[in-house]
Image (tube, rainbow, N blue to C red):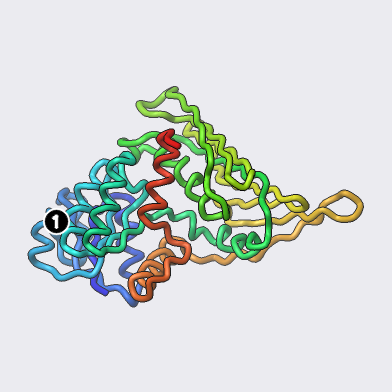
């Protein structure tokens, strides 16, 4: 399949390497208006999308531009019948997300959002074990220092949305209520946030995200009636603690593959275009719902 990449910043360069390494994808061009960033591009380079669409025939595009530009960029491709893989979050607000989804439907285009943690090998290792489980509580923590590359969104749209989205993947039930609090401490946007959620099946969830910590932590803990799951997304480890007859717990470390999440996501996206099987991918509607909750809408 022929593909174009839009954006050659930090995340764009990661996508560039991933696309080039995929034998089922032919990267024909990169769109990057900043010519200084484009020095290391070894395929056709365009400074605007219109010229690309006039010059190249592509099946899909990967959008890795700032969040505030996603709708404008997506429109150009979707209105020309080009499928899209857009970096998360889907848009800067839920209104723009809904418009993007509507345009995709109107033009019979597939729209997928790059919620990459869905393809974290630790998550993939846990998913099969959760099929017959009734989780009663989810707890997520995602801490780090401030990422200087992020300038247009706060911690909720950059970090919290990962875990809000993962809840929709891990839980068989939809979210009934979602409440959040955030604060601005040392940065221009929100840099510390907490979420409390309730699902229709009665399960609860808490999410804590922050840019104020001197270390990186990305963990999800899941509690069932007799098991306790600890999923370390940063170190790619997963452990299940099962209650025994004496009231203690026995630890079982799951085998976690050393696969590359970005590569697995791209492979799944190509398969989705070919077969219609969504798998662990996050479609536009689901990404829009996550954005709704992050914005504080129920």
Q: Residue at x 31, y 46 (%)?
A: 97
User: Closest to the observer: 160 or 47?
Assistant: 160
Residue 56 pos. (x, y %): 13, 68
In the displayed structure, would residue 116 be above or below residue 211?
Answer: below
Residue 69: where, in percent of width, then height? 23, 44
Q: Residues within 10 Å of mark 1 (few under 14, many from 20)?
A: some
- Reading the image, the residue beneath label 1 is 49
Q: Nearer the viewer, residue 200 or 221?
A: 200
Q: Residue furthest right?
A: 246
* Image location (x, y in percent) of residue 17: 33, 64
Question: Residue at the location (52% across, 55% down)?
Answer: 169
Left or right: 199 in relation to 113: right
Q: Is residue 78 above or below residue 59?
A: above
**In the rendered image, which quarter contains the C terminus?**
top left
Give coordinates of residue 140: x percent, y percent.
58, 43
On-image quarter of the N terminus: bottom left
Query: SS of the residue at dot 1?
Result: helix
**In the rendered view, would you say 25 is above or below 95?**
below
Left or right of 190? Residue 142 is: right
Residue at 27%, 52% (x, y): give it: 102
**Left or right: where 95 falls relative to 35:** right
Q: Nearer the viewer, residue 113 or 37?
A: 113
257 vs 64, left or right, is right
Count of numbered labels shown in the rendering: 1
Residue appearing at x 35%, y 72% in the figure:
22
């Amino acid at each position: 399949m022929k593909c174009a990449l839009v954006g050659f910043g930090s995340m764009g360069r990661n996508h560039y390497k991933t696309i080039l390494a995929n034998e089922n994808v032919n990267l024909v061009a990169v769109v990057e208006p900043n010519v200084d960033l484009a020095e290391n591009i070894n395929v056709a380079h365009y400074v605007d999308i219109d010229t690309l669409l006039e010059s190249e025939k592509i099946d899909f595009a990967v959008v890795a531009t700032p969040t505030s530009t996603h709708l404008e960029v997506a429109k150009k491709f979707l209105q020309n019948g080009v499928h899209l893989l857009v970096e998360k979050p889907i848009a800067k607000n839920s209104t723009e997300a809904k418009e993007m989804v509507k345009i995709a439907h109107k033009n019979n285009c597939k729209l997928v959002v790059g919620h990459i943690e869905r393809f974290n090998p630790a998550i993939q290792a846990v998913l099969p074990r959760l099929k017959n489980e009734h989780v009663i509580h989810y707890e997520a923590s995602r801490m780090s220092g401030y990422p200087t590359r992020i300038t247009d969104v706060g911690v909720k749209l950059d970090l919290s949305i990962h875990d809000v989205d993962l809840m929709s993947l891990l839980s068989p039930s939809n979210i009934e209520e979602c409440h959040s609090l955030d604060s601005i401490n040392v940065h221009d946007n929100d840099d510390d946030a907490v979420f409390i959620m309730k699902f229709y099946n009665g399960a609860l969830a808490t999410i804590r995200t922050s840019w104020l910590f001197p270390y990186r932590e990305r963990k999800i803990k899941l509690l069932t009636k007799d098991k306790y799951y600890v999923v370390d997304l940063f170190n790619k480890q997963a452990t299940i603690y099962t209650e025994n007859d004496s009231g203690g717990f026995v630890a079982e470390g799951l085998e976690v593959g050393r696969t590359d999440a970005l590569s697995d996501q791209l492979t799944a996206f190509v398969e989705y275009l070919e077969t219609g099987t969504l798998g662990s991918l996050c479609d536009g509607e689901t990404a829009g719902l996550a954005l709704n909750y992050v914005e504080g809408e129920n």
